[in-house]
Every structure is written in C-alpha cells, then in structure tokens.
Amino acid sequence: MSGDVVRQRHSLAGWWVPLAWLALLLALSLGMGLLEGPLRVIEPDSRDVLYVRASFLALLGQHVMVVGLASLLAVLLGVGGAVAVTRPAGRDFLPLVTQLASIGQTFPPVAVLALAVPALGFGTLPIVVALLLYGLLPIVRNTLAGIQGIDPGVHEAARGMGMTPGQILRQVELPLAAPVILAGVRTSVTINVATAAIGATVGASNLGDPIISGIVNGNTAYVLQGALLIGLLAITVDSAFERLQRRVVRQG
C-alpha cells in the first residue's frame, strides 16, 4: 500500500510544471498592465501600449475554446478514419485517407479561411474548419503508425483467447497504440494554438486580436502581448501533453 501511495504522489508531483506555466499564463492575462513600463520602452511614440479593447482573460478563453473544439473534431475524425482503414473492409481506402489528411495540412489555413468565409460567414466557424483540416495529418499518421506497429503475434494471441475484432481493437490495439496516438494529438493541438491567431482576421475573437491590431496600427507592443500569451498557452498545453504521455507509457 505504501508503494502505491508513493507512486501516486510522484505522479501528482510531476504535474507541477504544466500547472506552473498555467499559473503564469493566467497571472499575465489578468495583470498585463504591470508590463506597461517595458512596453513603453518598446513603443515610446505610441499613446497606448496596452491592448484594452477586450479582456485578455476573455480572449484566452475564446482561444482555448476554438482550439479545443477543432482538436476534438480532429481527434474524432482522425482516429476514427485511421482505425476504419486498418480494418479488413477499409484497407482499400488507406491511401485515400492518408492523402486527404496530407492535403489538409499542406493547404494554407489562410486559403481555407478565404474559401470558407463566403460559405460560412465571418466568426468562429471558418477558423474551426481551418484548424480541423490543419490538425488532421499528425493524428491520422500517428494512429496508423501506432496500430500498424503492433506485433502480429499480439493479434494472434488475442484471437486465440477468443476475443472478437471489436474487443481486440478496444482492449489491445488502442491501448498499445495510445502513446503514439497521443504524440500525434500533442503535435496537432500545439500547432493549432499558434495557428488559431489568424482567426482574428475573419472576426473570430481570440488572442490573435492584439496581434492583428498591432500589425494594422504599427504597434509592436500590441503584437508582443498577443504573441506572449499565445506562446505561454502553447508551452502550457505541450507540457501537459508531455506529462500525460509519460503517464500513459508508464501505465502501458
């Protein structure tokens, strides 16, 4: 029992790094005004150096919401599609799914927005579509690699135990492939944290707002505020996924 308690405490202690980054992100979102002095050094000729058109905490929440929604859809479609084409009935579609996912990432998100806005209008929906397409490739590729990399002997042993195809998928393939799949999700989400900033160009309010406003008005201080928060958010998300990957590997 004491060994279990020690392992549990060690596991919880490992989360202090992402929690520390999260605390710094929230503190800066609430206290950006404390940086007014350094920002005035960067932009001495600007009357306003603090972005005050919207609360940074609100922009952070909207940014997380957009990335979270797009990433959830990408995981559902990416993992689901990759699993489907590794089944006997779907193997003929494997090249097609891989190519479609690759095209989604090589197609610039700005171009996706330009095509999506006339059909979907301004706001959040076009950037969700762009992030969804942009985030599919790492998830599809890693899910395929994880499932296809399982030793055939494992499948034989599972079938020898009388497990159905569905049970093999749920109890054998997905658990064994989970670390590789999670690595793909980590890459996808981290990339999309930064990419989501372009949503501000089509009316999707997020941490890209001060960046776009700074570019338009020639105010470097605005750009730095948005970029700093996006960078901290990306580090927070990446460190949380790193900790989660270690836990999954250890449990596997």
Image: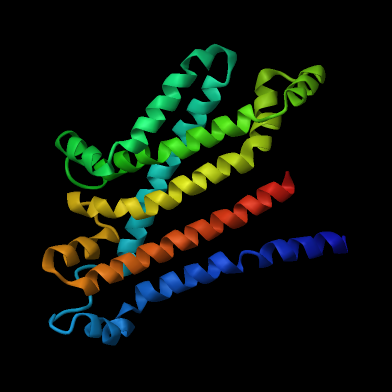
The residue under the point 38% across, 49% down is 192
Q: Which part of the image, by quadrant, shows the C terminus?
A: top right
The residue under the point 46% across, 20% down is 95
Residue 234 in view (yes/no): yes
Place of residue 49 in the rendered image (x, y in percent of width and height, measured from the top left): 20, 78
Q: Is residue 106 left or right of residue 120?
A: right
Place of residue 237 in the rendered image (x, y in percent of width and height, measured from the top left): 48, 57
Q: On the image, which quarter does residue 219 sit in?
A: bottom left
Q: Is residue 57 left or right of residue 237?
A: left
Residue 73 in view (yes/no): no
Place of residue 203 in the rendered image (x, y in percent of width and height, measured from the top left): 19, 52
The residue under the point 19% across, 69% down is 53
**Residue situated in front as seen by the camera: 145 or 8:** 145
Residue positioned most to the front: 106
The residue under the point 78% across, 61% down is 7
Q: On the image, which quarter does residue 14 sit in?
A: bottom right
Place of residue 50 in the rendered image (x, y in percent of width and height, measured from the top left): 23, 77
**Residue situated in front as seen by the camera: 108 or 25:** 108
**Residue situated in front as seen by the camera: 217 or 25:** 217
Q: On the image, which quarter does residue 54 sit in?
A: bottom left
Q: Which part of the image, by quadrant, shows the N terminus?
A: bottom right
Residue 110 against residue 18 in the figure, above or below: above
Residue positioned most to the bottom: 37
